[in-house]
Amino acid sequence: MSLDETRACLCLASRRAARAITAAFDRALKPHGLRATQFTLLSVLAIKGPTRIGTLATIVGTERTTMTRNVAVAEKAGLVVTRRDEADARQRLVGISARGRTVLEEAFVTWRRVQGELAAGLGAEAVDGLRRFSAAGRRPAMGAVS
């Protein structure tokens, strides 16, 4: 058995790519006081309106506990507001705050620039492949925000 073939591991390559892409967005969004995760959260809320934490986690493709932490950080920064869901008091709804909307709008130009730079660096074929692969793994609720 030769382990040389593990050097071409898709799991490792995808993790490295995800870290590099996230780092590029984090660096660019830092002057706006955002990380890539917060930009994504604000974008989803701006599109969908107030949303349950579990639904947000499904849309973004993260664990509910991770989304709960991300929402807490964003709420502390004044980017989102939470309230009890009137339809189910056990649930909380998360909405974008006025401050969050302003920050999102200001950061959007930066996000668009980085998005374009990364897409150009990867090339159209790689970007299309990445999007197709990502879409194939989506859960039904994710389609609402693509």
Image (cartoon, rainbow, N blue to C red):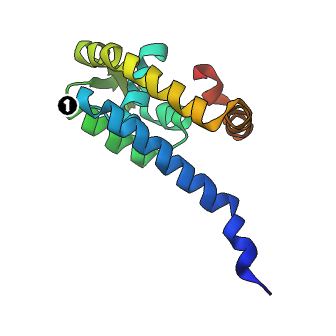
- Seen from this angle, which residue lies furthest bottom? 1
For the residue pair 86 and 63, the one nearer the viewer reads as 63
The residue located at (54%, 33%) in the rendering is 118
Question: Which class describes the residues within 10 Å of circle 1: few (<14), some (14-19), or many (20+)?
Answer: few
The spot of residue 28 in percent (x, y) is: 35, 32
Residue 96's spot in the image, x, y percent?
Answer: 33, 19
Q: In which image quadrant can residue 76 be found?
A: top left
Residue 78, horizontal then vertical, whole percent: 20, 25
Q: As drawn, which residue projects farthest toward the front?
A: 121
Residue in the picture at 45% in, 22% down: 113
Query: Where is residue 128 shown, x and y percent of the image?
Result: 72, 31
Residue 94 in view in this figure: yes
Total marks in image: 1
Q: Quadrant of the N terminus?
A: bottom right
Q: Is residue 11 above or below residue 4?
A: above
Answer yes or no: is residue 44 visible: no
- Position of 1 with respect to 7 (left or right) is right
In the depicted structure, whether residue 122 falls above or below residue 41: below
Quadrant that contains the C terminus: top right
Does residue 74 appear to the left or right of 139 in the view shown?
left
Q: Is 88 above or below relative to 121?
A: above
Q: Residue at x 42, y 24 (%)?
A: 111
Q: Residue at x 34, y 40 (%)?
A: 70
9 or 63: nearer the eye? Answer: 9
Outermost residue toward the right in this view: 1
Please state if 37 lies on the left or on the right of 7 as rendered.
left
Q: Which residue is mark 1?
A: 77
Can you tell which quarter of the image residue 102 is in? Answer: top left
Q: Disc 1 residue type?
A: Ala
